[in-house]
Image: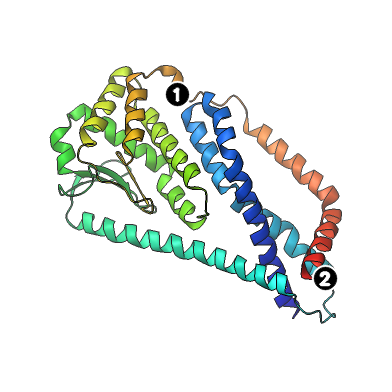
Amino acid sequence: MFAARGIAVSFSVFVLVYCGLSLAVGCSWRRLWLLCRKYPVERAADLLFGLRVFPLVGVVAVTGAFTVPSFVLLEPRSINEPIGLIPLALGACGCLLAGFGVVNAGLSAARASRRIAEWVSESVPADTSGPVPVLRTSQVTPPLTTAGIVRPKVLVSGTAEFILTKRELQTALRHELAHVRRRDNLKKLVLRAIAFPGMAGLESAWLDATEMAADDAAVSSSTEALDLAAALIKLSRFAQPEPSTEIMMALVHSPAASVNARVERLIDWSEGRKAPERGYSAWYALGAGLAVVAAFGVTYSQLLMHVHTATEWLVR
């Protein structure tokens, strides 16, 4: 009974904290997004992704660092206390929420794997000298796609090779390699695992920002920016709509308004868009982390008592 109560309490806190943080992020991300528009788009994309995963990080921290320890250390094992309906219902919701995330991510990864296998089965190596292999696929596949997480690869269709000039194709390939460096396919898989109602706008904004960040990483001059803009315009005529559940990054994806915004940015390209080198040392982050740990170390026992009091009220 002690273990059953602990599981019910843990999942109850999990669902309450996760839903609360998700609602807070869903209501506030647009204001934060407007405030960070002045920063380079790469940092803006990282901020949006950080906001999206903040509910998961927060609930794991609260449950793992406070809820479970407070219950194990402070809950009497000898008391045969029944579990109320509220923690049972909340615990069941927490289990369903976690299970849905795992299943949703698994199904999305399976769909993407089947589609990638179909494309790769008809492909031939185009360039295997670099850290990421480039494969030439048939004409019915998307023009340019970054596929895979553990073993990423770039797929180039015959259509893209035919209509793009050599410079345009090289710039477009650098764009896809930027997605590999930023691990954007893995991030999309994480988003599938933490799907939550009302987050579509935030995820769409992150996708647009990360595409623009890859654009900026692929170009270093106005000439290269114009080459990438030309590639976007040409390939947009042949691009197929990308399902939101696909764990892949395509050079051109729907909606068209996003592609138009990227083309306008590239035409108006400037050196100032490059993210400047960070002016702070990692020692500052280490010092801040040690200060936080020290503060929690001093107040940890009191925090556990308050958390246990709250969970006791929840069980009753």
Q: Taking 204 as reference, is 89 above or below it?
A: below
Q: Secondary structure at mark 2?
A: loop
Q: Position of residue 89 (x, y in %)?
A: 66, 71
Q: Amino acid at mark 2?
A: Glu
Task: Nearest to the eye among marks 2 and 1: give it.
Answer: 2
Residue pictured at 77% horizontal, 40% vertical: 291
Could you tell me which quadrant the N terminus lies in?
Answer: bottom right
Residue 247 against residue 44 in the figure, above or below: below
Q: Quadrant of residue 116?
A: bottom left
Residue shown at 61% from the left, 39% from the top: 28
Sequence order check, earlier mark of 2 and 1: 2
Say if residue 218 shows up in the picture.
no
The reply, left or right, for residue 129 in relation to residue 54 is left
Tag 2 residue: 75
Label 2 with label 1: CB-CB less than 8 Å: no
Tell me where residue 103 appears, x and y as whole percent.
Answer: 46, 65
Callout 1 amino acid: Lys
> Residue 59 in the image: x percent, y percent?
65, 55
Label 1 belongs to which residue? 274
How far across and how far down the image is residue 107, in percent? 39, 63
Q: Is residue 112 above or below residue 231?
A: below
Q: Residues within 10 Å of mark 2 (few under 14, many from 20)?
A: some
Q: CA distance from mark 2 to mark 1?
A: 54 Å
Give the left or right position of residue 81, taking residue 275 as reference.
right
Secondary structure, mark 1, is: loop
Mark 1 is surrounded, within 10 Å at the Cα level, by few (under 14), some (14 to 19) or many (20 or more) other residues, namely some
162 sits left or right of 22 in the view: left
